[in-house]
Image: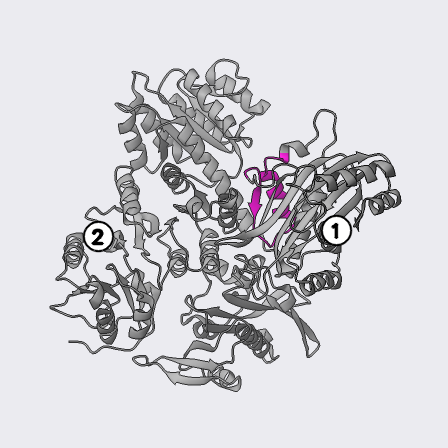
Amino acid sequence: MTVPVTRRFDPARLFHPGSIALSGTATALGAQLLANIRAGGFAGALGTDDEPLDNADLALVADGPAAVGAALAGHAARGARGAIVLSDAPDLRTLARAAGIRVLGPHSYGIVLPALGLNASIFGLAPPRGRIALVGQSDAFARTVIDWAIPNSAGFSHIIGIGGNSDVGFGLVMDHLSRDSNTAAILVELNRLRDPRLFHSAARAAARLRPVIAIAPGIRLRDGRQNARAALYAAFARAGVLLTGSVSEFLAAAETLTRVKPAHGESLAVVSNSMSLGNLAADCVLEAGLKLAELGPETLQVLSLSLGRPQSGGPIYARGAPSRLAELAALLSSAPEVGGILVVLAPSGGDDAAAVEALIACAKTVHVPLLIAALGEATGLPHRHRLAAAGLACFDTPESAVAGFRHLINNRRNRAAARELPPSKVLTVAPDREDVISRLAAAGAAGRHALVQDEALGILAAYRIPVIASRHVSTADAAAAAAAELGFPAVVKLSHPDLPTNSLAGSVALDLADAPAVRAAALAIEARLEGGMPTGAGFVVQRQAPRGVQLRILVQDHAVLGPTIAFGAGGGDPDDLTALAADLPPLNLTLAHSLIARAPVAAALAAHRGAPAADIAAIAATLVRVSQLVIDTPDIELIDLDPLFAFEHGVIAASAAIRLRQPGAERPPLVISPYPAELTTRLEVHGRTFTLRPIRPEDADGYAAMFTRFTYEDLRYRFFSALRTLPVEQINRMTDVDYAREMAFVAVEDATGQPVGGARLVRNDTDGAQGEFAVGVEPAAKGLGLASALMRAVIAWGQSQGVTEITGQILADNAPMLSFIRRLGFTIERIAGETEIVEAKLQTQGR
């Protein structure tokens, strides 16, 4: 019997265990687990209730609900630090904390690791080894994916059941998978997110390195608003994740993104042995909003020589030998105007198997995405199985293959969006914050949470959004006088917080040519109100806006994502949100342009029927300003800017509504943390100047170069091993951080623009009250106080985020670091069972 040792939780042990302890073998669930583990051929040590195992890397709990707490305590007492709970367990997080063990579950379907021969799950059928990871909550959904994977020769590195997501959740699991060299793509099925910010952070880190495909069953059920799904798609896109809306789409995306080269262009060439089916495939490309490849003169000339007949474009029809499809695909792959190739193989009654083998051989030389639609069932199904076994992306219809290419394009766009990190302050022209604060304070003092139109327009104007000059008046005579001052033609609108002008029939009068017309219109509006003008009601008078495209910008809270920004056509039914595209703050100009392009109204903004194009740059700037207003003003719950008129030379807001939060209500946290540029500081020492700022993804090359200047001993002290170069994935992970749950400061020497040191603090994945630090400075920059400045910066940031304990592991022979860290107030403690590593610990006040 071994002696249990005290050690820290290590996710690598949980997700790549060398030993397992299973409790609850007397239950039906436990017996099933034990049988599956033994049948899978797991070679590591296996402990059971009858033969307990100390220091197990992974504990499996299949006990009855009443016994789960005792089982966790028993596993922890024997040295286990990570567990998967497959049974029911109310308040599992409390039980796990009491036992001192981290858990997945409850109701996890277990874990399958084909490379280890481990099937510690409820599934009797396990897939082969491969490079796909599946993480999810529904066992029925996981069974469906496994059932698809086996005949399609899709292998897995991990299948992990999150279950009820009580403790260890998606964030930590995806963090691990993003670092796993044996995982090439991650599939995620999620029903509930405990912490959207943590998930977004982990998903973004993972998607930077490999494709991440997600499905979220029930997203419309949980938030019935018409644009809720658009907001969720935008959130996943900003993380670089491809969110799919159906099982078939999810599997098609998995088929494509795990087997096809990344897309570098957005045009698709179609090759087929059937003219009719080739034309149908081309129709599918166009109907999907994709581009059919337009071949250049040189490509057409070569193609015509190969075909023996003139080729003018469109789908390419391959007659003759079965190998012709492969030859044409290889020829097209070298054309710069071709972003991808779709081969449509219809049953020919000839040697179609030879065509399949030729395509398999050809695929090795094709440098663009290659998708194959092998049609039919009697002959097509065996062909698809053969293509899948060879690792090619194959589909049963052209429509599915085109959808697969669309997934490639969307994944490319999403990953580009994920690289955008707008700072918390993005405006080049400073807003009048004092004016906004004054207006909100006045509304609050009056007990009003809905701002009348001229007040809302005033707040927008303070953020340099062009607005029509307005006058708020109480009588029809005052309206006529205001219109005379502003100019004609004029507009009169009813104004009252409880009577929205854009939904009350007859509350707006347009094209008023003179003062008498304005007075008459105001009296007519008043007459339509039963009982006359209510207390506090009045009129807003404006000069009529220039003719243009009417747009709408709507800011409101999403049930899961917090504040969202929707954009689309304006002037219609305010309750109809179906035509609005959505995104999340913060926005920069790049993201704003992308949002505009996604909205159905984008076509109306282009030049058409003799009308000039709208000023897209001005629209994008308005979206950025609204985003900044949302970030700066947590008290604002809703902004409805409708209409915003867009024309050739700019935009102008004609109507707006703003609603404030109730007293004491807090804004939901932003899922996407802005780049915290305000944390940048300068340090001058011995005639050298340095900028200390939060790290950015574009620092990756400089950061990697910095580590090449570290000595052998520096690298051993920093990484506990003497790596001469760091893997690209590790560098990307160190420079692409989520500023809500971790912070990395880099010291950049102003004279060279190169990083010379860095420090980071990573909060834990539960309550964020604990964090782990790391710090390093290159030899030529030591002795300048950079390490102290960097550490003080991360400690201060941690305190501002509520971190109360900061720890870090240090090699016991690293005397310089031990001395340095003691000077900062850390205490040094031995780790039980460790002789080479000690732990530094600092208690802080938090915020």
Q: Which residues are magenta?
A: 578-602
**Between residues 218 and 794, which one lies in front from this camera angle?**
218
840 sits left or right of 96 in the view: right
Estimate the x, y position of residue 232 in percent, counting from the top left: 49, 48
Which class describes the residues within 10 Å of circle 2: few (<14), some (14-19), or many (20+)? many
Residue 728 belongs to magenta span = no
Type of amino acid at the residue the image marks with label 1: Asp
Residue nearer the viewer, 698 or 460: 460
749 above or below 194? below
Q: Residues within 10 Å of mark 1 (few under 14, many from 20)?
A: many
N-terminal-most mark, 2 or 1? 2
Q: How many marks?
A: 2
Hey, which quadrant is residue 507 in on the image? top right
| Mark number displayed over residue 770 | none
Please name the residue that numbered disc 1 is placed on.
454
The residue tagged with tag 2: helix, strand or loop?
loop
Asked whether residue 116 is in view, the answer is yes
- In the figure, residue 679 lies in which quadrant? bottom right
Q: Quadrant of residue 595?
A: top right
Q: Amino acid at mark 2?
A: Ile
Q: Which residue sits at x=44%, y=31%?
A: 402
Q: Kindly report which numbered mark, 2 or 1, lies closer to the viewer in this rendering.
A: 1
Examine the rendered structure and indicate whether residue 412 appears above or below residue 115: above
Report which residue position mark 2 lands on: 122
